[in-house]
Image (spheres, rainbow, N blue to C red):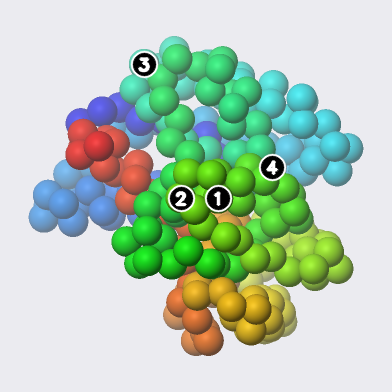
Amino acid sequence: MRKFGLIGGTSWHSTAMYYSTINRIVNERFSDNTNPPLRLVSLNQKQVHDLQRADDWEGIADLFAGAGRELERLEVQGMALCASTPHRIFDSLQRWVSCPILHMADAIGAFLGTSRWNRVGLLGTRFTMAQDFLKGRLRDRFQVTTLVPDAQAQQAMQERIYSRLSVGVFDDDTRAFCQTLVNTLAGKGAQAVVLGCTELPLLMNDTASSVPLVDSLRCHCEDIVRFILKEK
């Protein structure tokens, strides 16, 4: 198995799900308690959020570069970002580290391809919904058209992610808000909706939906396991 690095802490709730999901998938592959060689660098989410609010993406890139270099000193053979929004600085980080970084959009795109969905909704932070670091990669590499809520709904989602999901509050009000957005995107022709913030699968787990919900965290973890087990 390849030694693999995780850059987490954004948030620790979803980072814990990355760790448990990767281990669970490997256990299932081996039909026993075999564990993969994982290394984790956990960042301070409060610091990252403060930099986001200040629109200081260079500062965020520096934090992730430090984490990436720390993982390389541990001789990992690949790494991943345990959240969607930090993929905005993916290209910069990949230039600073020599080992491959597994991009979340590639994992999502591969899954969408197997399901033959090419028109999907996307929920996540305002950055993820408004900018192209996930949407553009899905479009350019997988020919997937992505639909997102309007600007007002994006801001409302951003506030809920900051004030609730990132601190572990997964309440019925936020769940109902997300269900409304899913229904709106389905009404615009989305064949499925990608839960593109890694806290959203924790919120929407086992929730009834008018269209299929794509768990971005699970897609990413499946791709990570394929890399660790040299299946890709």
- Tell whether 218 sits left or right of 209: left
Q: Which residue is mark 4?
A: 45
For the residues labelled 2 and 4, say whether their Cβ atoms are less than 8 Å apart.
Answer: no
Q: Earlier in the sequence, mark 2 or mark 3?
A: 3
Residue tagged by mark 3?
Answer: 75
Query: For the residues marked 1 and 3, what is the alpha-carbon distance in whole angstroms?
Result: 33 Å
Label 4 with label 1: CB-CB less than 8 Å: no
Task: Identify the mark at residue 142; answer none if there is no mark.
Answer: 2
- Contact flag, marks 1 and 2 (Cβ < 8 Å): yes
Q: In front: mark 2 or mark 3? A: 2
Task: Residue 20: give x, y in percent of width and height.
Answer: 37, 52
Can residue 98 be seen here? The reply is: yes
Q: Indicate whether 50 appears above or below 91.
A: below
- Which label's residue is closer to the chain start, 2 or 4? 4
Distance from Cα at disc 2 to Cα at disc 3: 31 Å
* Front label number (1 vs 3): 1
Residue sitting at x 62%, y 23%: 92
**Residue type at numbered disc 1:** Arg
The mark nearer the N terminus, 4 or 1, is: 4
Coordinates of residue 201 in the picture (x, y in percent): 51, 66
Q: Secondary structure at mark 4?
A: helix
| First-in-chain label (4 vs 3) | 4
Tell us which disc is closer to us: 4 or 1: 1
Left or right of residue 110: residue 172: right
Q: Are marks 1 and 3 in contact (CB under 8 Å)?
A: no
